[in-house]
Image (tube, rainbow, N blue to C red):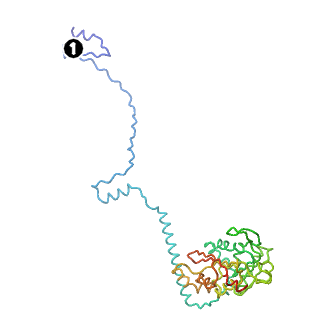
Amino acid sequence: MNVNQLRRVPLVAKWPVTPCRNASSKAPRPPKPSPKISKPVAIKRRQVTAPRQHYQERPSPQGTQGETANAETTAKPGHGIPPRALTFLGMTALTISTYCGYLYASYTREVSKAQTLDVPRDVSDRYNTTAATFDADVELSEKAMGLGKKRRDLVRQARGNVLEVSCGTGRNLPFYELGERRGLDADGHATVLGCRSVTFVDLSPQMVAITNEKFEKLYPTFPATFRACDAGKVEPPSDIARSGAKTKEGPVYFDTVVQTMGLCSMPDPVATLRHLGSVTEPGSGRILLLEHGRSYYDWLNRILDNLAPAHADRHGCWWNRDIGDIVRESGLEIVEEKRWHLGTTWRYVLKPKQSTGKSQS
């Protein structure tokens, strides 16, 4: 087979034909098919985003100290107090410090003023001028100290013929249970509860008038007695003998004596308590006290002592009296004793000693 015969052999597309080894190297090679020119197609490249790093890389030890501090500041999220909170705390601290400074300045001024005052022992006449504004003056402080509940718990124990001394402007009036009824006492024994009669006494005529007006609005149909006199000289009214526990031939007593915040303004509180014990029924009678005076703590007592003259001159109250000493000197028997507010609020339930009852029988 020669070269011309090879040229006549049709080429098969599927199987390429390789020239024979014996063929001449000068034979022309078949032409290459020209490639088809296709239109360029735009290829959309996918944007590859770097994965989020869940940790902060440590700065290179080769960097400078300033670069390291900047890298840590930028990398680590802040965990400090927000600026608004810092501003609020700063304003609060400034307000508290300013108020404490004001209190200290006022305290120093009052102490220096109190040292120059010559206040008499009897300051009860101050209530004649403060009667009109007394309720407004003490309302906020009594609510803050919870004295309303303490007044209620004390007055609810009143029964029978009741005497309230140092009645003031009648702040205990809403807590009385007027009208007798049968019920059970604290020990579960059958007894008579409620008030049979009520007598109100105070040294200030202006305060007695305010109490009378309040009582008529709260209990318009219940009779009561109002007196402007010294509690150390009060005697039971004669009309309670007909409804009281004693007979007409025997002495007349009060079944319950109530006094709240009164020992601080009395000229002679010990003598007053002794007299109240003499007009209280010897067997089952009770004297109910809610007072304010000296504290458990010496530092607070020093404050009370320093401000006592100025406070008594303005409000008619010696708030540094030792209520415990007054009660013990009176000779009355202590049934119950409680204290609150750092020891400045005292509650007593007292009764006359049996020897007193025997001497009067």
Q: Position of residue 222 (x, y in %)?
A: 79, 75
- 56 vs 28, left or right, is right
Q: Quadrant of the C terminus?
A: bottom right
Please state which of residues 284 and 261 is positioned toward the viewer in this rendering: 284
Q: To which quarter of the image does residue 187 belong? A: bottom right
Circle 1: residue type:
Cys
Q: Position of residue 28 (x, y in %)?
A: 23, 17
Please state which of residues 2 and 336 is positioned toward the viewer in this rendering: 336
Q: On the image, numbered disc 1 is attached to which residue?
A: 20
Question: Residue sitting at 51 percent across and 75 percent down?
Answer: 98
Please state which of residues 359 and 237 is positioned toward the viewer in this rendering: 359
- 74 vs 114, left or right, is left
Q: Secondary structure at mark 1?
A: loop
Please state which of residues 193 and 212 is positioned toward the viewer in this rendering: 193
Q: Is residue 211 above or below residue 76?
A: below
Q: Quadrant of the N terminus?
A: top left
Q: Position of residue 346 (x, y in %)?
A: 61, 77
Q: Position of residue 94 (x, y in %)?
A: 49, 72
Alpha-carbon neighbours of circle 1 within 10 Å: few (<14), some, or many (≥20)? few
Q: To which quarter of the image does residue 5 belong? A: top left
Question: Residue sitting at 39 percent across and 48 percent down?
Answer: 54
Count of numbered marks: 1
Q: To which quarter of the image does residue 283 belong? A: bottom right
